[in-house]
Amino acid sequence: MPTYDIRGYYNHSDRNVLNKNISDPPLFVVNGNIKQPTDLIRPTVIISSQGNNDWDRCNYLYIRNFHRYYFVKSKVWDSYGQIIIECEVDPLMSHKDEIKQLSVIAKRSSNTYNMY
């Protein structure tokens, strides 16, 4: 079973913010497993809880193998000393570089508009 490079953060921003304000450096960087079967949208991460006290503060993950950021939906500690974390992808932060490079014509804007 392959291991995954998982970085835990505390996210200070709302879900609809493109460039999230996350803790830097990460709260933790660990190798973990992904519960199988899985998908990129809602993976379940399994990590050893030993040696780190920042699990409670973590509400945001980056899975380097997937090149995606995730919101933490739930955390459960099992009897084997592992944390099972259910996640949901954050498409805005995961694709922020591509989004910033988009060229668009906005039909509406909150600060620039034509009254006529």
Image (spheres, grey):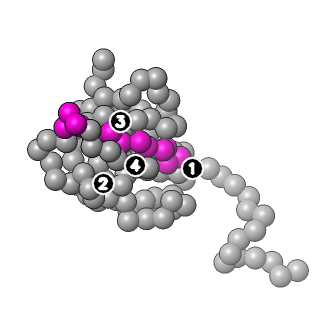
> What residue appears at the point 31 percent right and 29 percent down from the top-left corner?
33
Q: State the predominant SS element of the stretch in magenta.
A: strand
Rounded to the nearest whole Å, what is the CA distance between mark 4 and mark 3?
11 Å
Which residue does the image show at 78% across and 64% down from the upper left?
107
* Residue 21 percent location from the top left of the image: 38, 62
Q: Where is residue 70 in the image (x, y as percent from the top left)?
A: 43, 46
Please say if 11 is above or below 62.
below
Sequence order check: which comes first, mark 1 or mark 4? 4
Extreme residue toward the bottom, this view: 115
- What residue did someone put label 2 on? 58
Residue shown at 21% from the left, 47% from the top = 28
| Residue assigned mark 3 | 45
Dots 1, 2 in contact, CB < 8 A: no
User: On the image, numbered disc 1 is attached to which residue?
Assistant: 99
Residue 90 part of the magenta segment:
yes
Kindly report the distance in space between the C-alpha atoms of the residues bearing marks 4 and 2.
10 Å
Q: Circles 1 and 4: CB distance less than 8 Å?
A: no
For label 1, the crowd category at 10 Å Cα-Cα, with few meaning under 14, some 14 to 19 and many 20 or more, is few
Looking at numbered disc 1 in the image, what kind of residue is underneath it?
Ile
From the viewer's perspective, is 12 left or right of 96?
Answer: left
Say which residue label 4 marks: 74
